Image (spheres, rainbow, N blue to C red):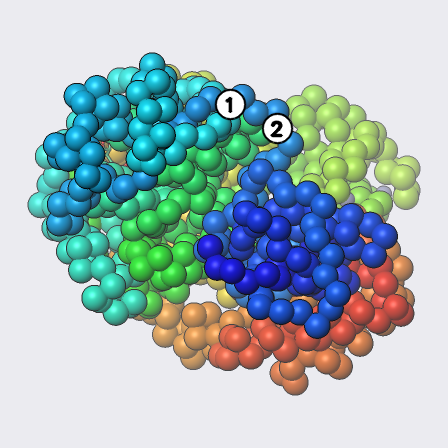
Amino acid sequence: MSALPVIQVEPLVSTRGVRGPFDYARPDGVDVGSVVDVPFGRQRLRGVVTGLKASSEYRLRAPTHVHDVSLPPDLVRLALWMADDVVSTRARCLELLLPPEGVGERTRLWAAAVLPPPRPDGAPAPGPDDDVYAGIRLTDKQRAALGRLPGWTGEDLSTLRRLEGRGLVTIEERAHGRRPDHATVGALHGDGTSAPPLNPDQAHAVDRIAAVLAAGEELELRERQLLLHGVTGSGKTEVYLQAAQRTIAAGRTVLVLVPEIALTPQTVARFRRRLGETVAVLHSGLSKGERRDEWWRLRTGEARICVGPMSTVFAPVPDLGLVIVDEEHDSAYKHGEDPRYDARRVAAWRAREAGAVLLVGSATPRPESWAALRRIGLPRRADGGDMPAVRLIDVRGTRGALHPDVHRALTDARKAIVLLNRRGWATWMECADCGHTWECPNCDVSLVLHGGRDGGGGGILRCHHCGHQERPPTRCVACGSVSVGQHGLGTEQLADTLPGHVYRLDADVRDRAGVLEAFGAADHGILVGTQMIAKGHDFPDVTLGVVVDADATLRFPDFRSQERTFQMVAQLAGRAGRGAGAGGVPAQVLVQTRSPREPALLFAARHDAHGFLVEELERRRDLGYPPYATIVRVVCEHEDEARVEAAATALALRMPEDTLGPVPLFRRQARFRRQLMVRSPARALTVGATRAAVEAVVADPAHRGVTLVIEVDPR
Ligand code: ADP
Ligand code: ZN
Ligand code: ZN
C-alpha cells in the first residue's frame, strides 16, 4: 500500500449535478476501491475511493466510516471508463459494480497461505509440498492443512492458528453460508461430468484457443479476440468448457456470459456439472445474501469461474484469463437503463485490461464481430445431423394466419416451434363503421387486447408501454356502433387456434423455465411464442419450425432489420432437427413472408451466414452505419411538451454539427419525447461532444426536470 495521504472520493449520488471526486484525509487501511462515508457540506454521503494523491489544496476532512466492502482497483477503473464511454455518471457506474450491502452476514473463519502455492505452469515455488516451507520444517498435519488452503478453517483451526503465529497463514472472519441452491443455478448431479471426445472441428477450435491462451500478451490485442462461429448445434458449449478448463489449469479465472439465465439454464448446468464448486453464478434471481456470498467467493479466488447474464462481466475475479460471450448476437447484452452499457464491449475492455483472451460465439454473429475478430469455425452439427431445410412461403393472397402448407405441416409434426413476435390476443381494436381505434391515454400507441377468447367485451385492453389497463369496448365510443373489430394476430390467439397440445412462451408468461421444461418433456405438442422461443434451447426432437410473419421484423424501420431477420430465421432453424431424438425425420423450417426475394431471407434459407455478413457489411460501409460509424442518440423527455421542445432545441445547438433532429417520438408514459441523433466515424470525439452538450443542458436551471436519455450504439 502506498503512503499517499489523500484519498479522492466519488460520492454515490444519482444526480448528474454532483461531480467528484473530492479530497479527504486517508485513514489507515483505506485504498482505491474502499467504500467510505464522508462529510459533504452538511450531509454525509457514501462514496468510493477512486484515487490517491500526495497533497491537496483543500483543508481535508476525514471519512466518518469505512465499510466492509471494497471494489478491486481494476473494477474502479472499469466504472470510470464506462461512465465516460456511455455518457453516464461515475456514481451510477460504481454503484452498479458494488456487491449488495447491508445484508446480515453469517461469518466463519477463512484461512489463506501467505506464500503462493506452486503454480502448475510455472517454476517450482516453495509450497506446502516441500519439506521445508519458508525455512520452517512442517509436521504432516501442518502440511496437510496448508495444502487445503485457501479455505474455511474447519477442524484444522488449531493447526492453522499455530501457523498463523509463525506468519505463514492469515486467518480472517468472512461471510459464509448462502450458496445458491442447485435448482436456481443448475444441478450438479446427472451425466456430463466428464468431457466427451471432441470431433475434429471442435478439437481444432480448442487447440487454436489454447494456443492463444498460452501465448497470452506476446500476441497483439487483435489476435487475442476470437469469434467462434459455429452453426446451431455444432457443440460450441463443449469448446467453451474445455477452453475454460485449460484456463483454470493455468491458474487463471474465467467469465462466461449468457444472454438470459432463465432461458439458458442448460449452459449454466453444464458448467456446474463439469467444473463443480469452482463455478459461481451471479444473477438477479438470487437473494441479496446469495449474491453477496457468490461475489466474495469470486473475489477471494475460491470460485474461479463466473457464469451468468450480462452483469457477470463485473464479477470481481483476480487473474482473469478468458472472457466468453455466448450467443453474442443477442440484444439482451445491452443494458436497458442508465448506465446503458453493452456487456460485449465491457467484456472486451476487461479482457484487454487483464491481458486475457476474449472468445465470443454465435451461429449468427453480428457484423461488428465478424469484421473485427479472428474467426474460428464449426461448420457442422456435432451429432453429424443435417441442417433443416428452410422454405420461404409466399403468403401474398393467403387468407388467415397460416398458409395451408404450414397448417398441414403443423398437423403432421410431432413437435414444432412457432414464432410470432407479438404478444396478446389482438394487437389493436377498431370500429368497423367510423375507424375509431382504442389508444392508451398516456402513450400514443394502440391498446392490445389480452385474453380476448370470448369475443365481445371479454379480456382486457393493455398498454405495452406503461401498463395502463381498461375494459374492452362493447360499442364504439365515437359513433356508438357495435361492430368493433379485433385486428392483428397475437401469440394468445394463435395458441388458441393451433391443433393439438400448445405451450405458450412470451413475456406475459410467468414461469418461462417451467414452460420450456414441460415442452421439452412432452411427447408431442407445439411451442408458440415470441422471439424468446428461438434462444439457445436444445430440444432434440423438434422437427418443424414456423415463422408466422417474417415481414414484421423486416419492415421495422432500423438499419439492423436485415440482421435481425437473418438471425431470427437462422436461430429458429437452429431449434429444429437436433439430435437423434428426431428419429431420422428430416426437419424443416417454414417462413411466411410477402417478400420472398429479400436477401436476408434467402441467405438464411441457404444457411449462409458468411454470404449474408459479407453483403451486409458492404451495405453498412456504403451507408456509413456501424461498425463503420458510431450512433449516439439523445432523447429528451418531459410531461410538458414546450419544455421538452426547449431542452431539445438547446441541446441541438450544442451537439456536433451533423446531428439530426430534434424529431418527435411517440408520447410514452405521459411524457413527450424529442430525439437527437448523430452518426459519426469518430467515436470518442462524438461521445465526448455529446457528453459536454448534455452536461451543459443539465446544468441549466431552465431545463431542470427534463430527462435526457443518452444511448451510445443503441440496439
Ligand atoms: P451449440 O451451442 O453450438 O448450438 P451445443 O453446445 O448445444 O451446440 O451442442 C449441441 C449438442 O451436441 C448437445 O446436445 C451436445 O451435448 C452435443 N455435443 C457437443 N459436442 C459433442 C461431441 N463432441 N460429441 C457428441 N455430442 C456432442
Ligand atoms: Zn365508431
Ligand atoms: Zn401507455
Q: Quadrant of the C terminus?
A: bottom right
In the image shown, does 222 or 364 lie closer to the viewer?
222
Residue type at tag 2: Val
Instruction: Using the numbered discs, state the Cα–Cα distance from disc 1 to disc 2 in whole angstroms.
Output: 12 Å
> Horizontal and vertical percent for residue 453?
66, 24
| 207 on left or right of 168 | left
Residue 372 in picture, x, y percent from top left: 33, 67
Quick check: marks 1 and 2 in contact, CB under 8 Å? Answer: no
Between 586 and 35, which is closer to the camera in this rendering? 35
- Is residue 525 visible in the rendered image? The answer is no
- Relative image position of residue 435 (x, y in whole percent): 80, 48
The answer to whether residue 562 is seen in the rendering is yes
Location of mark 1 (residue): 107
Q: Residue at x 37, y 47 (%)?
A: 318
User: Label 1 sits on what residue type?
Assistant: Thr
Above/below status of 206 relative to 597:
above
Front residue of 368/311: it is 311
Which residue position is annotated with label 2?
103
Tell which tag, 1 or 2, sits nearer the viewer.
1
Q: Classify the position of ligand 3 by quadrant: top left, top right, bottom left or bottom right.
A: top right
User: Helix, strand, or loop for circle 1?
Assistant: strand
Q: Residues within 10 Å of mark 1 (few under 14, many from 20)?
A: few
The residue at 50%/79% (across/down) is 682
Q: What is the crowding at mark 2: few (fewer than 14 residues within 10 Å), some, or many (at least 20)?
A: few
Name the residue at 89% across, 59% down.
640
